[in-house]
């Protein structure tokens, strides 16, 4: 099933000619209306008229999160403030918030992309969609909400929090689709278990999970536990929010990125040069239709690759691979690069461990230390100490073997690691800032 058959199956040549037309248009708009971009164009000695083909995008300047911060709150608006229908903001973990303004048309386009995404994930107009992404300045709740409404589904705007009550509502309302972060889905599932609500006995079919990194191993675990199909959705506030890309139920292999509205590139994060198709690098996105805050070549810091091979679902839009992590989430432990998801993968392969974990990085006598705290499941917890010690040693060994770093592994009691209601905080970095 498709939501917008014409757009979702547009032949490649037509996607590209539409993209070029829209790219030229957005360049003209930001040059005329956003002093920040006009200055960047002038400094680079280019004008919007220099964009004659899609490959000319390389001439354009990058935009970074810091540029949004420097122009806080409204410096990058490309329309008068009174044409802005809604604001969202992303706080991030460090620094000033980033504020994004949406015109009425931006909100419409966003709802369209989220509706397309939900349909691709296997949701339809008869579904009962429980939305447990946070509502508010965060784009997750309202983004999914508007898209699910556009699709014609029944929407339950649960937001985050009151977790046991939510599990109860899912049972009482007979939720068929659940939208939230993967870590919150696990928290909900656990809360359900505690009050006798087993997701497997609900009509729940689909999970639309994103906003934080998660691994393929985690997907399998969740599908098993919850009796659902767990789908990966990607997005970021700077571009609009959730629904920039989504996996399709047909192949579950890579996320279709809606190219009529967003133009992707993959660059080498160090040199800034475009990488050949298929290589993993930093995703750079240009908004093609956005009116409020259009962004040229926005550096997402997310690491992925592009796949233009045809997909069996019939959608012609490029697929991005499951995110490898953010370049700024990469931990450098005594010189070795480690992504939290790699550790997650190894945890999930170890029987008896739960998917609740935290990675603590510290520095002792000038040396980085890595500690992996991971909860045991209830069965293992009841086991003998000797068995637990062997398990700790085994996980430690596989981290050393596969990632090349020495980690201390600490098995924790079930439910002892703090649960989050939104994005999980997997990394605690106590090293002094340089
Ligand atoms: O997290 C938007 C969103 C809401 C996406 C709900 C999906 C579902 P931000 O708070 O601005 O926006 O954070 C964006 O989250 O650059 C990625 O690093 C990360 N991220 C988002 N989706 C995924 C995903 C929302 N599926 C940042 N896998 C992005 C891994 C993801 N990381």
Image (spheres, helix red, strand yellow):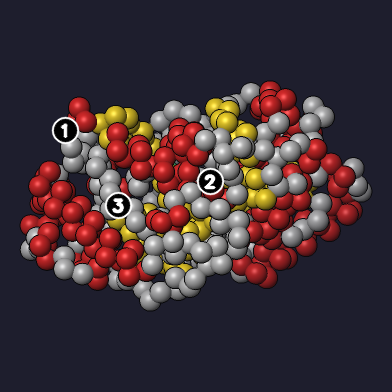
Label 3 lies in ligand 1 vicinity (Cβ under 8 Å): no
Give the mark toward the camera: 1 or 2.
2
Residues at marks 1 and 3, CA–CA distance in whole angstroms = 19 Å
Give the quarter of the image for residue 392: bottom right
Give the quarter of the image for residue 247: bottom right
Q: Which residue is mark 3?
A: 287
Give the mark toward the camera: 2 or 3.
2
Judge left or right: residue 204 versus residue 246: right
For marks 1 and 2, the one nearer the N-term is 1
Circle on res. 80:
1
Residues at marks 2 and 3, CA–CA distance in whole angstroms = 21 Å
Answer above or below: position of 105 versus 309: above
For marks 1 and 3, the one nearer the N-term is 1
Q: Position of residue 96 (x, y in %)?
A: 32, 36
Give the residue at x 25% y 68%.
54
Judge left or right: residue 365 versus residue 172: left
Q: Residue furthest right?
A: 384
- 431 or 366: which is nearer to us? 431
Residue 315 in view in this figure:
yes
Give the residue at x 44% y 70%.
308
Judge left or right: residue 43 versus residue 232: left
Secondary element type, mark 1: loop
Residue 336 in view in this figure:
no
Circle on res. 118:
2
For marks 2 and 3, the one nearer the N-term is 2
Residues at marks 1 and 2, CA–CA distance in whole angstroms = 32 Å
Q: Position of residue 335 (x, y in %)?
A: 49, 66
- 282 or 13: which is nearer to us? 13
- 423 or 77: which is nearer to us? 77
Q: Position of residue 376 (x, y in %)?
A: 78, 46
- 343 or 84: which is nearer to us? 84
């Amino acid at each position: 099933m498709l939501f917008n058959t014409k757009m979702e199956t547009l032949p490649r040549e037509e996607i590209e000619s539409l993209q070029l037309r829209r790219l030229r248009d957005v360049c003209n708009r930001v040059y005329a209306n956003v002093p920040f971009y006009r200055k960047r164009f002038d400094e680079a000695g280019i004008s919007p008229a220099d964009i004659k083909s899609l490959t000319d995008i390389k001439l354009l300047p990058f935009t970074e999160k810091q540029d949004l911060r420097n122009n806080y709150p409204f410096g990058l608006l490309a329309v008068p403030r009174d044409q802005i229908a809604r604001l969202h903001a992303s706080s991030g973990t460090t620094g000033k918030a980033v504020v994004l303004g949406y015109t009425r048309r931006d909100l419409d386009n966003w709802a369209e992309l989220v509706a397309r995404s939900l349909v691709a994930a296997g949701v339809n107009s008869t579904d009962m969609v429980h939305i447990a992404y946070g509502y508010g300045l965060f784009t997750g709740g309202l983004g999914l909400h508007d898209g699910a409404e556009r699709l014609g589904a029944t929407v339950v705007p649960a937001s985050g929090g009151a977790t046991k009550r939510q599990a109860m509502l899912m049972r009482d309302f007979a939720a068929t689709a659940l939208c939230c972060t993967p870590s919150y889905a696990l928290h909900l599932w656990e809360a359900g278990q505690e009050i006798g609500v087993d997701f497997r006995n609900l009509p729940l079919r689909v999970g639309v999970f994103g906003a934080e990194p998660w691994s393929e191993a985690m997907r399998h675990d969740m599908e098993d536990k919850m009796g659902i199909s767990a789908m990966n959705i990607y997005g970021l506030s700077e571009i609009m929010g959730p629904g920039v890309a989504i996996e399709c139920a047909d192949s579950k292999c890579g996320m279709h990125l809606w190219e009529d509205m967003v133009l992707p590139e993959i660059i080498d994060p160090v040199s800034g040069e475009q990488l050949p198709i298929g290589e993993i690098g930093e995703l750079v996105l240009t908004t093609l239709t956005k009116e409020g805050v259009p962004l040229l070549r926005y550096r997402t810091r997310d690491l992925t690759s592009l796949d233009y091979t045809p997909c069996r679902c019939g959608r012609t839009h490029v697929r991005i691979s499951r995110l490898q992590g953010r370049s700024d989430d990469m931990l450098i432990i005594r010189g070795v690069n480690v992504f939290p998801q790699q550790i997650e993968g190894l945890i999930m392969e170890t029987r008896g461990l739960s998917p609740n974990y935290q990675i603590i990085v510290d520095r002792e006598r000038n040396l980085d230390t890595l500690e992996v705290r991971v909860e045991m499941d209830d069965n293992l917890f009841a086991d003998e100490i000797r068995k637990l010690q062997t398990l700790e040693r085994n996980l430690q060994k596989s981290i050393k073997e596969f990632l090349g770093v020495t980690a201390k592994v600490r098995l924790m009691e079930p439910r002892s690691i703090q649960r989050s209601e939104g994005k999980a905080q997997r990394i605690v970095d106590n090293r002094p800032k340089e």
